[in-house]
Image: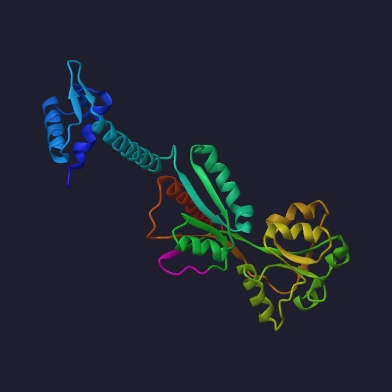
Amino acid sequence: MNVNLEYYRIFYYVAKYQNFTRAARALGNSQPNVTRAMNLLEQEIHCTLFIRTNRGVRLTPEGEKLYIRVSAAMEQLQNAEEELRDSSGLEHGSIAIGASETALNIYLLEKLRTFHMEYPGIRLKIYNHSTPQAVQSVKNGEIDFAVVTTPTDAEAPLKKVDLYPFREILVGGKTFTALGSQELSLAEVQNYPFICLGRETQTWRFYQQIFEKYGLELSPDTEVATTDQILPLVKNELGMAFLPEAMAREAIEKGEIVELSLRENVPQRSVCMVYDRQHPLSAAAKELKSRMRQSAAAVSDRI
């Protein structure tokens, strides 16, 4: 059976209003056209759907059964249309972002706060990922884009855009106060307890390459899953660690931890955005992505 789907749409409105004239008005059509379409539908499915009355029509038992199915389908289509309208504007919709702990803390939270204040109707879905996990989620189409830290691998069709440069500093607990006036080498750092993110992270890879550059092995005494876990461990004297300056500054100023000078240079890192150029974005995701890129361009101009 190959019934014109438009007939079912017309049937829905006739059954809803129980009147051909009102259904035609709702459809922006003429009453004769509506009547003709229903006659053709009844012929094609070989059953009577309506009983004509002086006031309009009422459904037959077969018509009632069909209406249950058609009304459910129409509701789904109307919901889909509403979602599409929402996603094409900035009053509603959603954005899915994969964010590493460091990127979230030193960059993304501020951007999301500003965006949410301006567009409170946009739903934000934030997934806490390591950098490799976030990039893989972009590849799989599970998120709109990732906000992570370098080093980051992003092969075509993925694109990486640097958003915010930051530097990491060496810090220790109060027991290292005496070392605060000295300049330490990486070789000397190995003589003290050391804390680092786990081996599955890009941060581990970053520091492993630095240590190897100077003929040393990265062998931390404590490995953690997220950057947020490092500061409490440093405060509780479990060892030295590298932390983004923005995350360590308040604790340093309060005298809770000590900044330590390092002889070797630690290269600057960046918060970056990774997205798939072939993946379509909602209006909301496009707007946030555009704002972050514009902000990055402004930072670049100031440097």
Residue 20 higher or lower than 80, as above or below: above
Residue 28 higher or lower than 127, as above or below: above
Q: Which residue occupies 55% across, 63% down?
A: 133
Along the viewing direction, whichever of 177 and 115 lies nearer the viewer: 115
| Residue 96 location (% of width, % of height) | 49, 51
* Main secondary structure type of the part rendered in magenta: loop
Q: Is residue 197 left or right of residue 237?
A: left
Q: Quadrant of residue 188?
A: bottom right
Magenta-drawn stretch contains 154: yes
| Residue 259 location (% of width, % of height) | 78, 62
| Residue 143 location (% of width, % of height) | 48, 55
Residue 95 higher or lower than 158, as above or below: above
- Which residues lie in the magenta part? 153-159
Residue 8 higher or lower than 184, as above or below: above
Q: Is residue 266 left or right of residue 88?
A: right
Taking the image as drawn, is residue 272 in sight? yes
Q: Quadrant of residue 25?
A: top left
Q: Which residue occupies 83% across, 59% down?
A: 236
Along the viewing direction, whichever of 46 and 94 lies nearer the viewer: 46
